[in-house]
Each structure stands twice: as C-alpha cells, then as structure tokens.
Amino acid sequence: MSIDKESVRRFFSLRELLTGAVEADPQHIAFKYKRDKEIVSVTNRALLDDVEALGAALHELGFGESHIAILGENGYPWAVSFYAVLLGASVAVPLDKELDEKTLVYLLNESDSTCLICDEKHAAMLAPHRAALAGLEKIIVFERARSEGDILSFSEVMEAGRLLDKSAYRAARTEPHTLKDLVYTSGTTGTAKGVMLSEQNLVSCIYYGLRATSIAGTGLSVLPYHHTYEATCEILVSPLAGTTLCINDNLRHVAENMRLFKPDFMMLVPAFAEHFVAVVQNNIKKQGKERLFAFMVKLSRFLRRFGIDLRRKFFRSVLAGFGGNLRHIVCGGAPIRPDIGKFFDDIGILMVGGYGITECAPLVSANEADGTNNFSSAGKRLECLEWRIEGADERGIGEILVKGENVMLGYYKRPDLTAEVMEDGWFHTGDYGYINDRDEIVITGRKKNIIVLNNGKNIYPEELEGRIQSIASVVEVVVSGVKNEHGQDIGLCAEVYCGEENVPEESTLTAEIERALSDLPRYKHISRVTVRRDPFPKTTTRKIKRT
C-alpha cells in the first residue's frame, strides 16, 4: 500500500531517518539479497545494528570525521558502508566502479579520502598504485577474510565494531549545512566534478521526493549505487517509504532476479526501460503474436473507457517476465519517450517520470503516481524548490534554473566552477526546457548539446533522437551538426546503431527517419545518416557519451 503524501514522516537527520524506521517496525524486511543459492533477509533492526557496528569501528580506527570512499559492485555491504558513514560525522565519497585505475587514483587523492571501503577487484586494481595514494591510510575490503597491515577485512572490522561501545559514534554529528556526501559526476562530456551535498540537501530530497511520488512494497535495486539517483531515491528513501529493497547482483541477472524477487516497483533510467520494451516486442514478434497483441491493446483501451481494467489479465504472460507483480516504474536520468511510457501503461504497469541532476541531490521534479501522470513532462517541482526559465525563446524554451533546500553547496575545491553555475542561490542546471500550463517541467535537451544552425535556428538533438529511436530497427542514435569549411553547422547528421542483426539498408533507414520527422519543420530534418557497427560508449547509468 502506498502512503499518502500528507502522512510522510517528517525527519531532520539521516540518523533519525533510520532509527525512526526501526522504532516504527523493527522486524520489517529492509533488504533481501542472494548469498550462494539462499535469499538473505535483513530487518530494520539488523540493518541499524550492522550500520552502528561498522560506524563504531570506523570511529575507533580514527576515521570518525574523515572522507571515506566507497567503491564496488552493488551489494548489502555497500549499503551498510554508505549508511555507516552518513550517520556519523564523516563524509561519504561514493565512486564509480567502472572508472579506470588512473581516474580512481586521481579521485581518491582529489577527494582527500583517508579510508577506502571496496571490493577485492578494486583493491587489486589499486595495489600497484599504493605509493601514489599517500593520504589513504586504510583499505577495508569486503571479501577479505583476514586483515594484514593497512588492508583490513570488512568482516573483521564489523565483528570488532559489534563489541565496541556505540555512544561516541551515535553522538557524532555534522552540521546540516556542511559537506556530507561528495559525489563525482560521471558526465556525458568533460571531466568529473565533485558535487558537495549536505545532510540538509539529502534530507530535503528524501522527504519532499516521497511527497511528490510514492513507492511501496518490494523493489528490485538495479542501478549503480554510487549514482545519486539510486543512492538517494532508493537506498535512503526506503526506510521512510517502508519498502523492501532486493539487490540485483549482476546486470546479466536482471530478468532472473525479477522472477525470483517479484518486485512491485523498480527505479530505472530510460535505457533500461527501452531495453525491456524491445525484449517484449521481440518475443511477441518471434511468437507471431503481433496482431493479437495489438488487438488486445485496442480492446483494453476501449474497455478502460467504461471503467473496466483487464490489463493485468490480458497481459499476464508479458507481466510474468517482470516477475508478475510489477506495477510501478520510476524512471529518471533522462526524459521518457512517450511511446515507452504508453507501452507500459497498456500492459498495466505505471511508469512515472521525473527530472533530476546530481547537484540537486538529485531530484528536481516528479510526476505523481496517480491519474495526473504525464508522459510528455517530467512532472511538478518538489515543494522545497523554486524554478524559473532564463533566456526563453518564442516557444518559452530556455535554461532551467532552480533554487531551494536540496541544491548543492558547490563543487569541491572549485569555487571558479561553482561561480559559473550559482548566482544568488539560483543553480543553472545546463538543461533546457519550458514550464507548461500545468506547472510541469518539459525537458528539451542539454544546453551543451544544442546545435545552432547557420540560419540561427536552435536544434535540441534529444527531440530528434527520441523520434528516431522509436523506429523498430534503431537501437541507439546521436544527432550532431554537419559543418561547412568555416566550422558552421549547416545541417544535421544522425549516427545510428541498429544492433548486430537485421541492419537495414542505409536508404531504407534514411526513408524511415524522414517519415519519423515528417511533421517537423524542414530545418529539423536529417541531411546525413551514418550507420555504426558498435554501440556508443556509455556512462554507468547508460547515457551515451557525446564527443
């Protein structure tokens, strides 16, 4: 059962968040995960005990007010480490597990991390660079059975912590407006920046986010834990929402784990949702049931006009592939293609979109999980935020600026970069969009991606990419400018990846793209199409890296 926004419990610290969940229901299952062939369930009480054991041990080791980096695959130990750092007086530094060793060494030094909690893979990766990590005093390794020197066993640290007096750790606090979570942006272009988030930023995002759109029941946690969307909106929101998080151990096992854990909800980025739709459509095609499926969708839509909803019955076999219980998908990280949202709606799964950015901890807006959900927008702003559009054109499109309790402190050690995006408390998001007549934000694209043609017209490539990607044969696409000898953009190029099988002729693909864009002004049409053999390189949240 989802909670009404008026009944969301108010809290003012992350310690209060977790202890409040324990007081409300100590035996509620907070996490489930696989260990060997068994499913392990962790109660709220057991979670807090584990967090305090690790927190007390870190405090005893001298890291009570340190920057502590966390690095590794999604797992229960990662979540415990994150909570343990946040509930004390230290600063969490979640790092991207996909980064190369050179970048990791740079970020560990740049972040002033004195302790690293990581998996065996990354401990081995960083071992040859130990001399370059002069500020790193201890490395605590999840899988390590025994401690040796400055390499400590996570399990031994935990067991030592269970025997310690927890009072010093429980009393440790940071001021709500000081640095608590240092997050390095993955970014689709450029180098990583250290986003400084305070406890107030996180608390405001959790509380007001859950008032904006609710989640309930059991969730399958699949996005990388270092990413603020997953860390804040799922790991930290869960105690307040009273949900159970099931940890997906590997991306190759998502389908298997959906059938195993039978989630009620999932938090995804559009690339995941698009992949799920493609899998379902391919299965329907292989079974020769395309016409039957289309007929059932039309019949279902007709019946719903009279208040008869048979979607869960009509599409039971499709829903079984998602575990059978999936009813709610929260999608962030990029705008949802309306056809993707409509597909899930047709089979009985509500897809709710939102808009976020790391610098806002990360949530800015969300659609409500009710009849007001709008696939074409990213929803209404959080109650703790103001927003406005700067430099709007004749269509009302301009840069989105936000101001409020969950806006970052700034960029770590980079007052120059902070000054570029912060002005009188207003954060320049770098995203372009407009506010519709329902006071919802509609995202049109990234400021840095805008293509300005030599005739003065502005092109938002994301708008065209969304349409082109709706073509069945297109898996990925990037739209860029075609330049003349003077470096001016005089036309548009679509670089397309169609997968490894059934790649269409370029002339056929060009014709399909032309049809997909036929109702747009001529200056938005594609003048050149290229087909690539390999997928585009991506960030760990499956965003294409633009060059």
Image (spheres, rainbow, N blue to C red):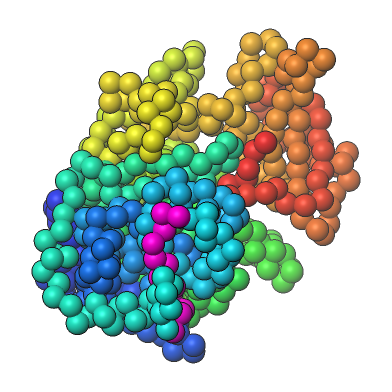
Instruction: Kindly identify the residue that appears in the image at 34 percent across and 34 percent down.
Output: 410
Q: Quadrant of residue 422?
A: top left
Predominant SS of the magenta segment: loop
- Is residue 16 found inside the magenta-colored segment of the image? no
Indicate the position of residue 35 as horizontal and vertical percent values.
Answer: 45, 85
- Is residue 138 found inside the magenta-colored segment of the image? yes
As drawn, which residue projects farthest toward the bottom? 37
Q: Quadrant of residue 387?
A: top left
Indicate the position of residue 314 as horizontal and vertical percent values.
Answer: 52, 69
Q: Quadrant of residue 272?
A: bottom right
Q: Nearer the viewer, residue 206 or 67?
A: 67
Location of the N terminus (image quadrant) = bottom left
Q: Is residue 14 above or below residue 152?
A: above
Instruction: Kindly identify the residue that appears in the image at 61 percent across and 40 percent down.
Output: 466
Indicate the position of residue 222 as horizontal and vertical percent values.
Answer: 48, 64
Location of the C terminus (image quadrant) = top right
Q: Is residue 26 above or below residue 16?
A: below
**Where are the magenta residues, as a range?**
134-145
Query: Left or right: 277 with respect to 494?
Result: left
Q: Nearer the viewer, residue 146 or 245?
A: 146
Indicate the position of residue 329 as horizontal and vertical percent values.
Answer: 43, 58
Instruction: Kindly identify the residue that appears in the image at 55 percent across and 66 percent down.
Output: 127
Q: Is residue 172 above or below residue 197?
A: below
